[in-house]
Image (cartoon, grey):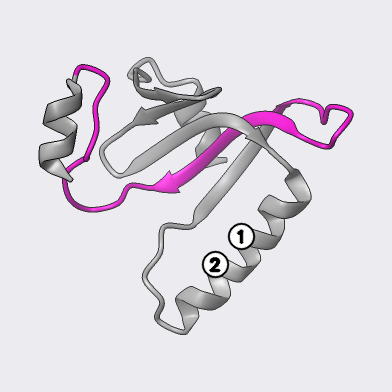
Amino acid sequence: MLIDEFINSEKREQVKAGGNKKCFVFDEYVLLYGSFKEEELQQEMRIAKELQILGVPLIPTLEYRVVLPPNEIGYSRGYMLQQRAKGNSLYSLSMKENEYEQRL
């Protein structure tokens, strides 16, 4: 699967982080690591495909990989692979608050 190539990539470098999440950016893809409910993610993926067929522009999750099984409230930890959105990032870890506000 495509996601395995990115999970195991030597070029995998964390560029963004947030509350219990990590983001790894590649040329055309983004690999996210965090918590999710697998059933909800599967439903979101189905809906995203339907919306794309109708012409709604969005960034769908292409694949996911669970690395830690669900906890007592149903959240798994793992990776999600998405196509990278076009344009420039609004935020980076090295940015100061006023720089971020200017970009917004």
Q: Is residue 20 above or below residue 3?
A: above
Q: Residue furthest right?
A: 72
Image marks 2 and 1: residues in contact by CB distance under 8 Å: yes
- Residue lying at 20% horizontally and 17% vertically, measured from the top left: 94
Q: Is residue 103 above or below residue 46?
A: above
Which residue is disc 2 drawn over? 48
* Secondary structure of residue under mark 2: helix
- Residue lying at 63% horizontally and 60% vertically, measured from the top left: 44
Give whichever of 76, 12 is nearer the camera: 76
Give whichever of 34, 100 is nearer the camera: 100
Amino acid beneath label 1: Met
Which residue is disc 1 drawn over? 45
Please say whether residue 86 is one of the residues in the magenta stretch. Answer: yes
Q: Is residue 30 left or right of residue 51?
A: left
Q: Position of residue 69 (x, y in %)?
A: 81, 27
Q: Which residues are magenta?
A: 67-94
Helix, strand or loop: magenta stretch: loop
Q: Is residue 25 left or right of residue 20?
A: left
* Secondary structure of residue under mark 1: helix
